[in-house]
Image (cartoon, grey):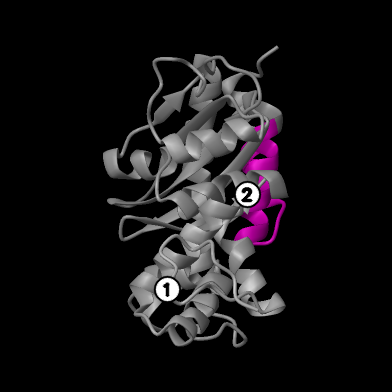
Amino acid sequence: MTASLAAMRAELHAAVAGAPPGIPAANALCVASVGLLGVDGAAVSVVYDGASRGTFGSSSETSRRLDEYQFTFGEGPCLDAVARREAVLVPDLDSPDERRWPAFAGAVLGDGIRGVFALPIMVTSMCVGALDLFRDTPGPMADEQLAGAAVAAHLASLTLLDLMATDTPDDVPDAGAAAADDDGWGRLAELDRIEVYQATGVLISQLNVGPAEALVRLRAHAIATGRTASQVARAVLEDGLELERDGQDGTGMGT
């Protein structure tokens, strides 16, 4: 039985208030959302300058990976929700009439996800990301669940404001050309997926290409090998993965 909106609001507020500010609060919000909104996964995704920049809260590692597909493929409900500033609701990704996001849809369907729902996260007049909700079975969310999701999206904006107000940790390296402007929103862009920007720096030297092409090559390798961009980045940084200098699809590996 679906909880009342008042009960959902109270439990979501309690989840955020009971956790440390910033990412822990965002994680707690996502976990509470799964229990209350009739979904199987939740993530808070930040979008900066038209691109997915980071997963700043998730109910599980699986939800974090599902959200990261949007960064890897450059498409997905989160990006559309931010661009339109409205909820994007897809009850069944496997429907014959559903043709959006072919790469993203193929990946999440392969992980057993059928429904995806994204609600924009607003901070004053700025749309800074989306609350992504994932469901294993097809079907629409009930009206009361959607109303609860809107409450969760509002609370997600507060966790992002807390993160913005926190000083950047001393051990976060400079993201170089891939980083955003030096302001609060830029810090949000830098705090997650640092390994991707570090690996991009390695590939710039390794492949003798510019930052944009290095990132494209990293993403291409991720798509071709069925991994996320962060997984490939860790392979570059920790395992010495090399991409072929003359490869065009990112699938080549050096010695």
Say above or below: 224 vs 143: below
Q: Which residue is mark 1?
A: 246
Residue positioned 64% across, 19% down in the render: 137
The answer, for residue 176, to whether it is visible in the render is yes
User: Which residue is at 29% across, 44% downward?
Assistant: 83
Q: Please state which of residues 249 and 187 is positioned toward the viewer in this rendering.
A: 249
Q: Residue at x 59, y 44 (%)?
A: 66
Identify the mark nearer the N-term, 2 or 1: 2
Label 2 sits on what residue type?
Arg
| Mark 2 neighbour class, 10 Å CA radius: few under 14, some 14 to 19, many 20 or more | some
Residue 103 drawn above or below residue 254: above
Magenta stretch contains residue 154: no
**Quarter holding residue 246:** bottom left
Residue 135: percent from left, percent from top:
62, 27
Decide whether residue 21 is among the magenta residues. Answer: yes
* Amino acid type of the residue tagged 1 in the rendering: Asp
Query: Which range is magenta?
Result: 12-34
Position of residue 211 measured from the top left corner of the image (x, y, whole percent): 37, 77
Q: Quadrant of the N terminus?
A: top right
Along the viewing direction, whichever of 9 and 224 lies nearer the viewer:
224
Q: Quadrant of residue 145?
A: top right
Q: Residue tagged by mark 2?
A: 65
